[in-house]
Image (cartoon, coloured by chain):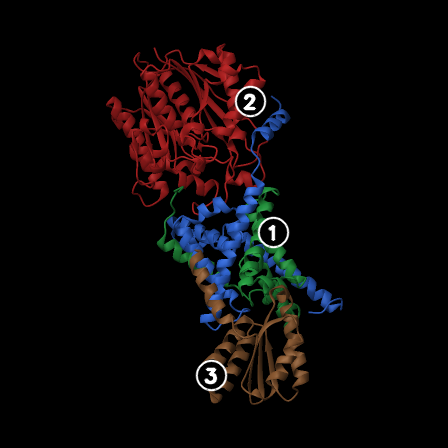
Chain colours: A brown, B red, C green, D blue
Amino acid sequence: MMLPLLVVLSLLNGCAEKEKFIVYGSPQNESEVEALINEEDYVDRSTVIQYDGSMLVAVQIKPWEKWKKTKLEKKLQKKFEEKYPNKDVFVSADYKIFYEANKIKKDQIEDNKLSDKITELIELAKEET
Amino acid sequence: MVIIFQSKPSLLAGGVVAGPLENRSIFSQYFDSVYDDERWQMKTNEQGHRKMIEEACEFAMKKIGVQNGDIDFMMGGDLVNQMTPTNFAARDLEIPFIGLFSACATSMSSVIVACLLTELGAANFSLAGASSQHNAIERQFRYPINYGAQKPQTAQWTVTAAGYALIGKHREEFPSIEAATIGKSVDYGMDDPFHMGAAMAPAAFQTIQSHLQQRNQKIYHYDLILTGDLGQLGLKLLKGMLVENGVKNEELTLIRDAGAEFYGQDEAFQSGASGAGCSAAVFFSYVLQQMRAGSYKRVLLVATGALLSPLSYQQGETIPCTAHAIEITMK
Amino acid sequence: MVMTFVFAFIVGGIICVIGQLLMDIGNLTPGHTLSTLVVLGAILDGMGLYEPLINFAGAGATVPITSFGNSLTHGAMAEAEKHGLVGVLTGMFEVTSSGISAAIIFGFIGALIFKPKGNID
Amino acid sequence: MEKEQYQQLEQNVTPKPPYLKNVAKAFLVGGLICAIGQAVSLFYIIFFNFTEATAGNPTVATMVFFAMILTGLGLYKKIGQFAGAGSAVPVTGFGNAVISAAIEHRSEGLVLGVGGNLFKLAGSVVLFGVVSAFFVALFKYILVTIGVVSW
């Protein structure tokens, strides 16, 4: 019973041991975004994907803060919207979004597909059931 | 009330058939047949239950060399709603039949009625007994078989077994029934269906007390007093009540319980065995064979029954219990 | 992510311990215990406390039966927010009924392929 | 012997449930089932298009599927005897209640047996879940309407 569980765990660790903050897409504001997230100490890890006018901020919240996930998500969303009023920002603390964002970065998806992929993820994150 | 049988009807033979799990019983060597399939290769548990009864009756008849047609009456019962397994077995056996329900005390109440018919001269041979089939009983009284509810240590395991005795006119070489006591329905306010031993112990106590009193006997006048299915805790309680009533400790070793001993010390069965088939199987195999072998000369058999239904329990009623006893002697 | 497993284990374990105490000390049958826990889940969701618990413990909060009360209440409240009073009635199974539907489907399939067996070990 | 006296004796003789042991077993097994549930939901998140918020449904269904296999093989009742609430409280216990009743009543046919008895154990959970959800939501609706709290 425990064996498959361990396999999944190690698989997870494999993709988790990356840099803490990742920004992918448009490198021009990389350090700015990183600093912005760095201010929020409840964020464990994050991956930000940018394309044209849209920006997907995928974060993982520290385990002990996770119960406030919904609130923190909203807080971060507001912060980014204020900072980048002309960008279409979407913040998600969901693991699925974070996982997919990392995959986008790893696979170096081409620009023309990136936009679709981001829209797809945002749609997914908005689903309730 | 004690009944004295002047003609001393004899227990000519016993037929006991049990299920696969009963292979583990310390009494299994005395059973006539232990079946591998709990359904006797039938489609439903209830049909298997019926088949088991028929086979037990056939074993009993075969031992004395009589046939269905020679049997005048059949008395018996089980725990399934309206006792269909026994009713249907009687249909197939084609023997005049009265179904009796005293829960797990049916093994004794049926023998008592059969003895009365024999005493009356109405019967040359009659069959009496009781049975229970684990799956069929559990689903009715408790939960579906595969439901994962935790049973407390006080719970007992319903046995899969049928025990039927062939009763006839007195014969020297067979154990004979001298007297019987029909018990009252006793209710000491117990209401836990997973603690039947505690509910039944007072009934056993009252029946034993009144039998001994009216027969003017003491416990040590018997080689064995064997109760039906009190289980380990119920037996402890019965002994506790007897001690309270001035019975000496050394006499207590004469009191045993079939349910407490049935599965040995296996903790998987919690407090021991129960079910109408428990007392019937042990009384009509082990006890009869030991008496014929001369190990016991005088025995008091006390079968106890908890007279509850799932309905009465759900409606919050307490559990009234009864106990019927027969006194058997062997020359 | 590893911590989520730890929290799932602990929170799920604690909910089961509450159930065990209801059974052993409260002397409740399994049916009574589960019903009590479902009501508890519904009330916690009404107070807005169950969702944080799910965020915190993941399956530790969604797998115990308390989540059933939570999701029913969640559906009812979400619909009530949108459609008013009628939503309380109609929204009940809106959010989730996967536990019930799975149990019905697998119950039916189970009945077709398995037979009850009175084994003990 | 009087009734009260007997009840006293019964209290003395009857062993108390081993509270600590039972609680420990319930915690371990219940926790383990939830951890397995977490692994299942992670599986759905990684390999399918489910988010943390939506993975709950397929997870629950999968756990009930596991419960069917274990119930059918007669293993769930053994886990239940060991773990008590540890295996009854997770949704697998709900599945076990439904599935065991379905298997049990197969002999009375699919309509009267399985259909009529499917929820004979788990029905109370559905009933109290729905009724309590109704009243909780109604209560909250009233509170929102009179302006005490907001959704």
Per the model, the C-alpha gap separating discs 2 and 3 is: 81 Å
Q: Which amino acid type is shown beneath numbered disc 1?
A: Thr
Q: Are marks 2 and 1 on the same chain?
A: no
Task: From the viewer's side, name the closer residue of B70 and A106.
Answer: A106
Vertical position of residue B44 compared to residue C89: above or below: above
Disc 1 element: helix
- Residue position marked by numbered label 1 in the rendering: C36
Vertical position of residue D141 compared to residue B28: above or below: below
Task: From the viewer's side, name the closer residue of B126 and B285.
Answer: B285
Disc 3 element: loop
Q: Left or right: where does residue A65 sit relative to residue B307?
A: right
Badges 3 and 1: C-beta atoms under 8 Å apart? no
Task: From the viewer's side, name the closer residue of B291 and D137.
Answer: B291
Q: Chain of mark 2?
A: B
Residue A86 location (% of width, % of height): 64, 89
Q: Are marks 2 and 3 on the same chain?
A: no
Vertical position of residue D68 compared to residue B310: above or below: below
Q: Which amino acid type is shown beneath numbered disc 2?
A: Gly
Q: Chain of mark 1?
A: C
The dot on residue B240 is 2
- Residue position marked by numbered label 3 in the rendering: A108
Badges 2 and 3: C-beta atoms under 8 Å apart? no
Per the model, the C-alpha gap separating discs 3 and 1 is: 51 Å
